[in-house]
Amino acid sequence: MSSEHAGQDLDRLRERLLAVRDRVGSAARRAGRDASGITTIVVTKFHPASLVRDLATLGVSDIGENRHQEAQAKARELADLDLTWHFIGQLQSKKARQVRAYARAIHSVDRPALVDALRSDETSVDAFVQVNLTDDPGRGGVAEAELPALVEHVLATPGLRLRGLMAVAPLEQPAGPAFARVRELSETVVRPREPTATDLSMGMSHDLEDAVAEGATHLRIGTAITGNRPVAG
Ligand SMILES: *Cc1c(COP(=O)(O)O)cnc(C)c1O
């Protein structure tokens, strides 16, 4: 790749990053919120480590990945950078220990076996309990009925610091009411059990405005910043 080409890529990346910052800023103003309370995690799945390096050049420090092997390889390759890695994908229990080694936060805690696998008496990792807002168990996340027990399980497990809830809005439904439901679950299920676990990880490229309006503290933004993802190979 010529340096001229790389420079154009970096310019486009900067433009998209600024456009998303504008969207977040406008949504925060409309909601009467301070945008500094909202962390934008840039989701770089399927993109090469070089893109993450470019993002770091532009001042991005929070990176989201959803597949362990890919995330681990990038975290190793970019160990010279001061990045915060967020694991946002479905996680097999047998990979849990390895993910703990590089991730500051795991947004996809969704079942008791995974909580047990993440237990540690030595180090602490931030945990978001993922709620499934659909009837399809394949979409990841704990069913609402099982949320209270799972929250209590996380709170009783050494090495996990509960931060709050995570959710993905269901397909083909308005995102606003879905995110409002997550906020309600935070208020009725999570905060009574742990008053500090107030965070809400919700909002992606196409629905970040709805998420900010409903109190999101962590947005997980991929394509609006990175451009289209390369096809998995
Ligand atoms: C890929 C992904 C995102 C980002 O999605 P975009 O639509 O590209 O912004 C957010 N959250 C999760 C869990 C993802 O897997």
Image (cartoon, helix red, strand yellow):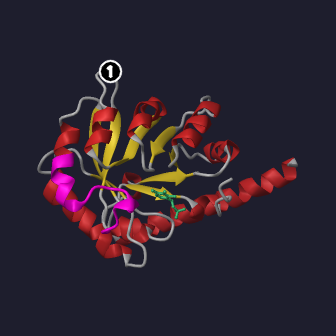
CB at mark 1 closer than 8 A to ligand 1?
no
The residue located at (55%, 36%) in the rendering is: 72
Left or right of 128 on screen, residue 10:
right
What x and y, as percent, mark residue 82?
55, 33
| Type of amino acid under label 1 | Glu
Left or right of 225 on screen, residue 216:
left
Instruction: Please count the marks in the image.
Output: 1
Residue 215 sits above or below residue 97 on the image: below
Q: Which residues are magenta?
A: 134-150
Left or right of 191 on screen, residue 77:
right
Left or right of 79 on screen, residue 183:
left
Residue 207 drawn in magenta: no
Q: Residue furthest top?
A: 122
Residue 148 drawn in magenta: yes
Residue 81 sits above or below residue 138 on the image: above
Residue 132 sits above or below residue 72 on the image: below
What x and y, as percent, mark residue 39?
43, 51
Query: Which element carries disc 1, helix, strand or loop?
Result: loop
Residue 118 sits above or below residue 222 on the image: above
What x and y, as percent, mark residue 156?
17, 35
Question: Is residue 26 or residue 77 the one in the foreground?
Answer: 77
The residue located at (37%, 66%) in the rendering is: 211
Mark 1 lies on residue: 122
The residue located at (42%, 73%) in the rendering is: 171
Q: Residue furthest left?
A: 192
Question: Is residue 187 or residue 67 the one in the foreground?
Answer: 67
What x and y, as percent, mark residue 125?
35, 34
The residue located at (61%, 36%) in the rendering is: 73
Q: Residues within 10 Å of mark 1 (few under 14, many from 20)?
A: few
Name which quarter of the figure residue 194 lies in.
top left
